[in-house]
Amino acid sequence: MTQTDLKTEAFESERPRLLRLAYRMLGSFSEAEDVVQDGWLRWTGVDISVDTPGAYLTRIVTRLCLDRLKSAKARRETYVGPWLPDPLVGAADPIETIADDVTVTLMLAMERLSPLERAAFLLHDIFEVPLKDVAVTLDREPAAVRQLASRARRNVKSERIRYALDAAEADRIARAFFEAAHGGDTTALAELLAQDVEIHADGGGKVSAFRNIIRGAEHAIRLFAHVSGKDAHRPILVRTAIIDGLPGYISYNPDGRLQTTALDVEQGRIRAIYIVRNPDKLTHISAA
């Protein structure tokens, strides 16, 4: 096997993990792909004698992500309406090959972290990279990295709790919410929603979506009743799915646009609804 073949084999074996790391850092599937491609270009110039290709590639991709996060912060400040990460839909997604415990809710909580805190937390707590290797990646002393990860952990602690649902229950709740929300069944909605429920809808200024986060069951019920009464045609449910670790579904709206809806369920009640309508964030989603 040639040196080029060996390098390609080493990179391809790491690609799914690198793609997932880049996505968790950036919240954008297309940017994650770009970063991993940049990582490949840098990898082609590296001597094949690298002892641990996985650690070396992780270092490259993390540093590329840190560079991109600087401009991402500026873009988020001018983003139209609530920002949500690109939705990943179960095993149908190219980077949904390595399971972790990061949900949409946790990714939004990580937006509060500095880029270095985010990197330290993801590498050490989620991807289980040894602390000494994280220190090399971030060019910091191990003690400083430990502090970064600890601060990040405290900041997102409440959002790491998982209320696992089995597949049948996840499917039932997703279908029940779809029917209640789009059928104008306010009684059923009241039974499904937590009192402090939040609705985050990401249209990115490209399509219609709620410009502000909707908070509280009363406001949510009134809003869904208004929308369902105004639409001449109901959305079409394509399929239920697990979206970034949460139960949800893919649907077509009356305007023919694709949408994903993820539901954060706690103790049988929906505490948050994450709707992505921005077409730029849905190009990798299969409606089949």
Image (spheres, rainbow, N blue to C red):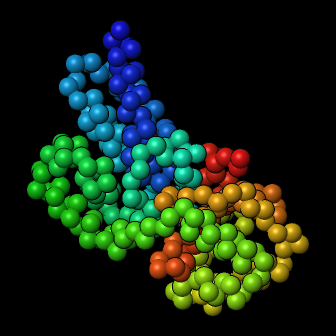
**Residue 239 horizontal/vertical position (percent):** 69, 57
Residue at position x 27%, y 66% from top?
A: 153
* Residue 203 position in % (x across, y down): 65, 63
Q: Residue at x 24, y 46 (%)?
A: 129
Residue 190 visible? The answer is yes
Does residue 263 lie above or below 43 as drawn? Answer: below
Q: Taking 15 as reference, is 65 above or below it? A: below
Residue drawn 59% across the image and 76% down it: 199
- Residue 260 x/y as whole percent: 64, 60
State the residue lying farthest toward the top: 2
Is residue 198 shown left or right of residue 148? right
As drawn, the residue found furthest toward the right would be 232
For the N terminus, the quadrant is top left
Q: In this rendered view, identify the residue nearer to me: 191 or 117.
A: 191
What x and y, as percent, mark residue 181?
A: 71, 77
Q: Nearer the viewer, residue 19 or 262?
A: 262
Residue lying at 40% horizontally and 68% vertically, measured from the top left:
162
Residue 82 seen: no
- Closer to the camera, 20 or 279? 20
Relative vertical location of residue 93 with respect to residue 251 in this rendering, above or below: above
Left or right: 220, with 38 as reference point? right
Number of numbered markers: 0
